[in-house]
Image (spheres, grey):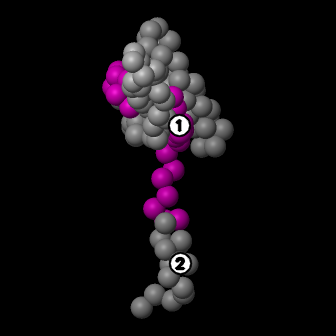
Amino acid sequence: MAKGHRSQIKRERNENQKDTRPSAKLSYARVSVQKACYVLDAIRGKDVETAIGILTYNPRYASSIILKLLQSAVANAENNNGMNPADLYIEECFANKGPTMKRIRPRAQGRAYRIEKRMSHITIILNER
């Protein structure tokens, strides 16, 4: 039987399973999940140089956000993990649903329509080839 308090046992178990891949996460990005996924699908599995080229010339608003996030992930890999940026590729990238801001659009005859401004949490995980 394991010795120690339950929280200590859990902490030790989680330290053994810690993910060491370089990553970057942006929370509360003011872009919907669907619009972010169009851009993320274009760069998934590509090497970093190609992905930066795709994002630079992509006209979508989400691509500028994701480009900054990718550059942050590359800097994390270089500084924290000591990896060479030329060998990196995008292993995982995904967007999760965030909270929604609700706004009002005034309409004719005293009516009001609701506008939902959606947010997302975007994550990019890199790895070496």
Label placed on residue 7: 2
In the rendered image, the vertical position of residue 78 relative to residue 56, given as above or below = below
Which numbered dot is residue 14? none
Give the vertical position of 45 relative to 76 (above or below): above
Label 2, label 1: how far apart the Cα atoms are: 30 Å
Residue 121's x, y, as percent? 47, 38
Q: Position of residue 51 (x, y in %)?
A: 44, 20
Residue type indicated by callout 1 = Tyr
Q: Which residue is mark 1?
A: 28
Q: Is residue 105 above or below residue 25?
A: above
Of labels 2 and 1, earlier in sequence is: 2
Quarter-of-image position of residue 74: top right
Q: Examine the rendered structure and indicate whether residue 11 appears above or below residue 77.
A: below
In the rendered structure, does residue 70 fall within the stretch colored magenta?
no
Please identify the quadrant where the N terminus is shown: bottom left
As rendered, which of 71 and 95 lies closer to the eye?
Answer: 95
Judge whether residue 86 can be spotted in this image: no
Q: Where is residue 71, by image quadrant?
A: top right
Q: Measuring 50% from the left and 12% from the top, which residue is drawn there?
A: 56
Label 2, residues with CA under 10 Å away: few <14, some 14-19, many ≥20: few
Disc 1, SS: strand
Q: Secondary structure at mark 2?
A: helix
User: What segment carries the magenta color?
Assistant: 15-43
Label 2 amino acid?
Ser
- The image position of residue 96, as x and y in percent, is 40, 40
Residue 102 image offset from top left, x and y in percent: 47, 34
Q: Are marks 2 and 1 in contact (CB under 8 Å)?
A: no
Q: Quadrant of the C terminus?
A: top left
